[in-house]
Amino acid sequence: LYQFINNVNKVTTGVCSFSKYIFLRVFIDYENFDISRYINREFFCEVWLSLTLYVREARISARTLERREFIEKY
């Protein structure tokens, strides 16, 4: 159980750190960036998935594609 919790903590910390990095970089480039569009479960799930190796779905929604392209910039 300890190892599982430790692994979850490491992944969560990585997602939070990468998300913070993304947002800081965006705020440097775009002073009027609307962060409220990205503070949601779906965005953080995409950040998590961007840090893992997995097969992406062939068909995705326009919103998911937008999130992935946003994350991939950083």
Image (tube, rainbow, N blue to C red):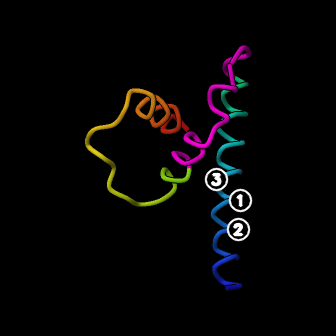
- Amino acid identity at mark 2: Asn
Tags 1 and 3 touching, CB below 8 Å: yes
Instruction: Give the SS element for disc 3.
Output: helix
Instruction: Give the SS element for disc 1.
Output: helix
Q: Position of residue 29 (x, y in %)?
A: 67, 21
- Amino acid identity at mark 1: Thr
Q: Position of residue 24 (x, y in %)?
A: 73, 34
Residue that numbered label 2 is attached to: 9
Instruction: Give the SS element for disc 2.
Output: helix
Other-residue count near label 2 (Cα within 10 Å), few / some / many at <14 / 14–19 / ≥20: few
Does 26 appear above or below 31?
below
Residue that numbered label 3 is attached to: 15
Report if residue 31 lies within the magenta region: yes
Determine the residue positioned at 68% across, 20% down.
34
Specify start and end residues of the magenta stretch as a single range. Answer: 29-47
- Amino acid identity at mark 3: Val
> Which residue occupies the foreground of this view, 43 or 50?
43
Residue that numbered label 1 is attached to: 13
Tags 2 and 1 touching, CB below 8 Å: yes
Determine the residue positioned at 51% across, 31% down.
70
In this image, 26 relative to 50: left or right? right
- Closer to the N terminus: mark 3 or mark 2? 2
Determine the residue positioned at 57% across, 39% down.
43
Determine the residue positioned at 55% across, 47% down.
47
In this image, 44 relative to 24: left or right? left
* Residue reaching furthest to the left: 58
Tags 3 and 2 touching, CB below 8 Å: no
> Which residue occupies the foreground of this view, 43 or 51?
43
